[in-house]
Amino acid sequence: MALGKIVKSLRAGKLPPLREVPRPLLKTLATFAQVRGKFTRLSAVERVLTTFMHKEPDRIPVTPLVGAAGRNINGISFPEFSQDAEKAAEVFLSSYEFLGGDIVILMLDLSIEAADFGQDMIFPENSTAYPDHTNPVIKEIADYRRFEPVRLSESKRMKEFVRMCGLIVDRIGFRSMVTGFVFGPLGVLSMMRGAERLFKDCLNYKKDVIRACETITETLLEYVQAQCDTGVPAVTIDTLYASWNGLSKKLWEEIEGPFAREICNLIKRNKRVTAIHNCGHGIYFDSQIKFMEPDAISFAHLPDDCKTEQELKEKYGSRVTLVGYVQTPLLVHGTPRQVMDECRRQIDVFGKGGGFILAPGCEYPPNIPLTNALAMVKAAQQNS
């Protein structure tokens, strides 16, 4: 991609597909933005680009990771948010306009894919949608081999999510970086089997679980491609069970690792930024980097091979962009001042040398006020 075209995109507030730009040129652009940021405010696009190149922008980028919590701005219900692309887009857009932020991560809930595989869903009026665990799709081991891939054209929730991605890209444009979202194949299986039973099956019926992951991945590849086709500049994959909350490292690498690699390779072929979200305890940074080679990892807890935040920064801070990791209990129970103090502390720990985006460790809690989301954004803006 020619330098003139890239500069023109940046000045227009548009993020060029980063994987289409030669890395030396990206570094040059990031260095230029880093210098310019000492004298003037950068655009969100410039700030994110500089951060991904592990250089320090004018300030740390921030994303409050607000999904369903933004419903109250417009009085939209949980069921509407979960099932109506227009309503969901309105929530994300209103949250962005109200709070600001440099990245908009499009997370609805973790049951979208499973619902289209036939999992019965419950859509509460006052809570996030979730599977009906009394009627799982996978009731016995033989069921792992019985279900077939779902075509996107025949889906309901996935197709509506893709439509929402297109609406957000059109309405937010490139004022902020928008990222799609997909749950990894083991996560989808857990929605249709139950996590505890799935973990036992991974140990005792590994081949059956792998066969099911293969079926699911065929659908997820079409789903991810459709998200890329909407113009989102990034896609995030949730690999929750690559952590102490899921499988052993070896077992995760044997079962989900190859399929996660296949999904991420598709994202990269589309010249999109590849991100991982994993809010598990003791997450396997090393395994996920080996299989998926992400640009960024969103985390809620320290990885299994790091005892301190400083060790995490030293070990992985130059290899991937770290996204996190304000804790959920603090967002629920803390005052705005306490949240801002913690944000500033994390910026001091992780921000030096770039490669850090301030965010909650997981989705901003959907049933609390947006006060502490605003506190996060303000902390990043004032720490410049």
Image (cartoon, rainbow, N blue to C red):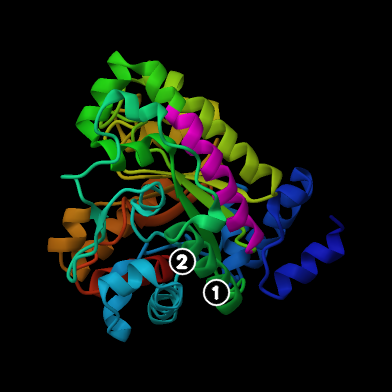
Q: Picture quarter containing residue 334?
A: bottom left
State the residue position of label 1. Answer: 167
Depth order, front residue of 7/147:
147
Q: Is residue 80 magenta?
A: no
Depth order, front residue of 139/254:
139
State the residue position of label 2. Answer: 384
Instruction: Judge from the rendering whether residue 252 lies leftward or rightward of residue 121; answer left or right.
Output: right
Magenta range: 212-230
Q: Which mark is residue 317?
A: none
Residue 170 place in picture, x, y as percent: 60, 76
Instruction: Judge from the rendering whether residue 177 lies leftward or rightward of residue 253; answer left or right.
Output: right
Residue 291 place in picture, x, y as percent: 53, 27
Query: Main structural element of the magenta stretch: helix, strand or loop?
Result: helix
Residue 335 place in picture, x, y as percent: 16, 68
- As drawn, the residue found furthest toward the bottom would be 74
Residue shown at 30% from the left, 80% from the top: 76
Q: What is the secondary structure assignment of the residue under circle 1?
A: helix
- As drawn, the residue found furthest toward the left would be 333
